Amino acid sequence: MNHADETREVIQFNLQQHGLRIFPLRDKRPEAKAWQEIDEFVPENKPFGVHFTEECKVIVIDVDDMRLLSHFKHFFDRTYCVQTGRGFHIYIAVNAKAKETIHHFINDKKQKIDILSSGGYVCGETSEHYDKDEQGVYFKTGKQYKLLSKDRKINSIDYNKEIKPILEKPKFNLKKTSIRKRNVKAIENGVETGNRNTELFALACNNLKSGVSPQTAYDMICFINQQSDEPLSKSEVDQLFQSATSTVQGQIEESNTVHKIDDKTTYRLTDEEEKTLRPITANEDERLILVYLNTDVEIAERKDETLPMAYFVINGKHGKALVSCENAELQKKYSSNVFQSFKSLVARWKNADIQSWLVSDTKVNPKDLFDNLLSLEREYFENPYDYDYFYEVCWKVHTYFYPLFTLTPYNDYTGMKNCGKSKRLKLNKFICYNSWSSDDSSNSSLFRTIGGTGATMLLDEVEKLGSTKTDNSDLQTILRGGFQNGHYVTKSEEVRGKWTPVAYDVFSPKAFGHINPIDNVLQDRCITTKLARTTNKTIANSEPEEDENPKIYQCRESCYRLFLDHANEVKSLIPEARGLFTEVSGRELNLWLPIVTIALFFEKHGVVGLVDKIMAKLAVNSEEKKTKDAEQNDEVKILTILLEANPESIPKRSRQLYAFINRGLNELYNIEPVNDVSLCNYLENLGFTPRRDNKGTHWININAVKISEAKERCGMIKESQATLSESDSSVGSVS
């Protein structure tokens, strides 16, 4: 193989394997301020730097004079060497002890040689060479950093036996100089041009280590730089000093954060947050989504097996990829608790279609996907209200984007027997992300399944949760907490013979079907769709089957593509979507936000009038919920009694006030008298204030203003404002 023809990606990957970091340059200077933290592929159109971290075991001998070629030429066949604009770089692998003993030096003949180890960087092979003109402006010289050695293997060369003797020849000064003497010399003469960065960096580190204040160390470096023949710019000095500070602070902090427990165990404290890889993950760098694919596994001395193995499909700044969940780089980057195998979720996105997406530059068309999903809804269901068709499409699509949001709304289907609840759950099972249903609602594996697969959970006859015949406490716990992002449910489990609290991430979309009412706590997490039996025999007799209707798989496959292609765009629309809410706030707003954001996304891609459709359903749903709350809420009942009375006639003394309220509860709601303690709590919850005097307790602010404020807080509106029409015919159809 001709190593000179290897791609830049291969070159950078080889360097990274040795613990060296790759980052972009704008000329010879780092492109980003925090360049020390960057390690990424840099494309051909940009120069790149090679950063020597504390951890890497590589040094570079940087020779800036080709006249010294004869001293080092014999190394070119032994390790990785790169020609620079003025000389060459020799990359050498060393152990940690040797790295600590190697120090900077300057040739007395002004022939510049430098050794870069921790904290420094060089320009990488294939980068264009830059130099400075008399005004200090960088320009391209037309030269390029080129391969000099026979290959790119970085090998070890004994520094003391082979390199140091070369450097110790007459005219080379290898004597260590005290910090004070180096400072004095640098203050008087500045630093030489070929060693500006390295020498200033070393001086900054040494001064910071000596105990002077950061401000003093910085001022000293700035002064020394100005004394130099070709001083660095202020931004270059600032970057250099930031790098020195990070290096020194890291060394200082380590002494306080490393705790050796025994000969085999060391604890290292850190402020770094662990990156968690969820089944659906979207961050600034990449989008990843979990899939299960049948995999032929060869096992030594055993019969080969075909297993449904876990993979991540990735789209990010490094391109597209399909990688195993056991991929070393993936595990190094993220912590993950995904299920390695899950038979019922295999091939929801088929391998052939994944491979097709990996090599394609074409993004999925959002409007085509929306239209196809809408046609499925109209094919299998008849809804009393038109907006429900459009809501259903948005809800299904949101199951691929839900980790972008604070809350995910549960999809609640309710209606009489044979109104299509089970059929709706069945279509959800085909379309939604990793949809899964279980008949065993008491199984503790539910926690692991949701966390490990990101499953969209489907439940029929959810009203049976209140039954005392079965233990469904696990499921109830999941449902109460699983609508919130970042909310973990803790269970005590036996680990290595000890009972230990284990936290499970149960955040995922869920859909229910039921005839009888469900409890208020669960209802508050839902968006409800009321169903009615269809009179259309064609629809009544239709049944969604993936094997019979290829459009079903086509839609699901497109949903995977939609997330990978458009997740960043959807995320960017969240603030705009939030601004569309005028009548709702708090939890209700955040519950609807994923649906409205998805609707806004589709509308921007050609689905006309969709946001209005969703807002119409929101308004009706919100009003129905307020009415239901009012019917069931004791505070609202008491407030209704106060609203119907003349504020001036309402008693202010507790005894008379409580009797007044209980009469009203009996007359309006046929409720038995409520005890004084409960009534006191209800009134305080409404915002009214009791005070004690020598005559007992009285209420100081039961007046027209406070009653009106309580009415607003409870979401009670005048009858004339209320209800949107039962039909949403005023909303234009979606094209």
Image: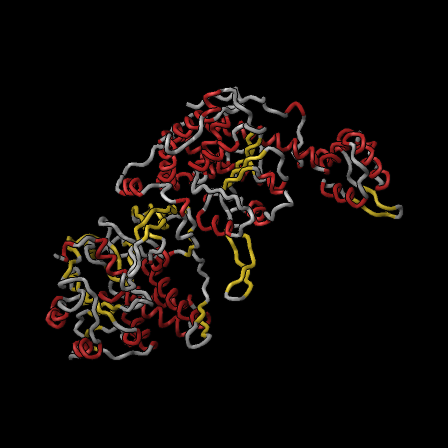
Q: Where 662 sits versus 70, above or below? A: above
Residue 194 percent across, percent down from the top left:
22, 65
Question: From the viewer's perspective, is 257 left or right of 234?
Answer: right
Evaluate whether residue 271 shows in this view. yes
**Quarter of the image that includes the C terminus:** top left
Residue 100 percent across, percent down from the top left:
30, 75
Q: Where 483 sits versus 330, above or below? A: above
Question: From the viewer's perspective, is 576 left or right of 199?
Answer: right
Colouring method of the image: secondary structure
- Extreme-right residue of the structure: 695
Q: Where 246 sits versus 472, above or below? A: below
Q: Residue at x 27, y 64 (%)?
A: 18
Q: Nearer the viewer, residue 583 or 402?
A: 402
**Quarter of the image that includes the N terminus:** bottom left
* Residue 254: quadrant of the picture: bottom left
Q: Nearer the viewer, residue 297 or 15?
A: 297
Q: Nearer the viewer, residue 24 or 513?
A: 513
Q: Where 86 sits versus 396, above or below? A: below
